[in-house]
Image (cartoon, rainbow, N blue to C red):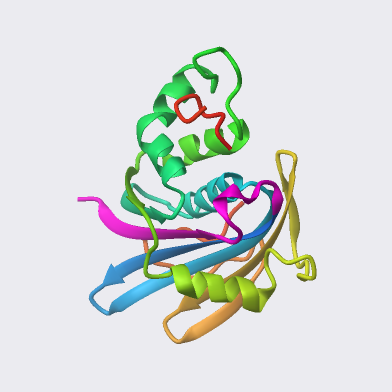
Amino acid sequence: MEQKVNLYLGVSGGIASGNIRRGWCCVLEVKGAAGDTTREGFGEVVGTHRLATLIALSHALGRFCRPCEIHVHSEDGWVLAMLDKRLGKWAQCDYKDSKGNEIDHRAEWEAVHKLAKGHLLVPEPGRHSYSSWMESEFKRRKLGEESGDVNVRINLGECEITEQYEIEYGQEALENTIGETIAAPAAVQQYQEGEEDGNNT
């Protein structure tokens, strides 16, 4: 039986704000007999709300080491709808829409499709139990602000991303950068590296 995991996504800035500097966050929550265990990831990207959502999603999916039932919670209902209804068809058509044009954020959608294989993804649109906390963390960490500190920079496609990590494991909080590993539940791997047509950014 596949283990159930809740994946919560958050992005700073409004969906209609266009290409701006945005913070993103993902929280993996695994429920167990001894209590809940969470893993958190934070980062920044200059781009649309949907681009940031896809980056947070692919970052989180990259942590899984075995198939799970993943409930994906996000305020970006469009991304969740495309994830559920269109992504498989886009992959079959080389990530092109019905007019033969390449879909927006192809590299990110392709990464999500690859990382989602073997998992059961269940869309859960709307605000969630971590929404308010993520918003406060974006402000505290200055993510999505022009004055925000840059700790680690990586490239994903044409986007420059700043990533900061904080992992909670029981009572212990650790600051980690790319490449470091920690103990984690079996389901969760360490840190690693038009609407229908997919051109609605």
Q: Position of residue 149 (x, y in %)?
A: 78, 71
Question: Going by the picture, which residue comes out furthest to the left?
Answer: 1
Q: Is residue 147 above or below residue 186?
A: below
Q: Is residue 200 magenta?
A: no
Residue at the limit of the structure toward the front, as seen here: 16
- Residue 49 visible in this rendered orientation of the protein: yes
> For this view, does 171 lie left or right of residue 85?
right
Q: Which residues are magenta?
A: 1-20
Quadrant the C terminus occupies = top right
Q: Is residue 188 visible?
A: no
Residue 88 place in picture, x, y as percent? 40, 27
Viewer-nearest residue: 184 or 97: 97
Name which residue lies at 37% across and 64% down: 128
Residue 73, how many percent across, how many down?
Answer: 38, 56
Query: Vertical placement of 137 versus 171: above or below?
Result: above
Which residue is more in the foreground, 186 or 33?
Answer: 33
Q: Quadrant for residue 129, please give it.
A: bottom left
Q: Residue furthest bottom?
A: 171
Q: Position of residue 27 (x, y in %)?
A: 46, 64
Residue 10, magenta (yes or no): yes
At 41% from the left and 29% from the top, the residue drawn is 86
Q: Is residue 134 left or right of residue 7?
A: right
- Front-lying residue, 106 or 36: 106
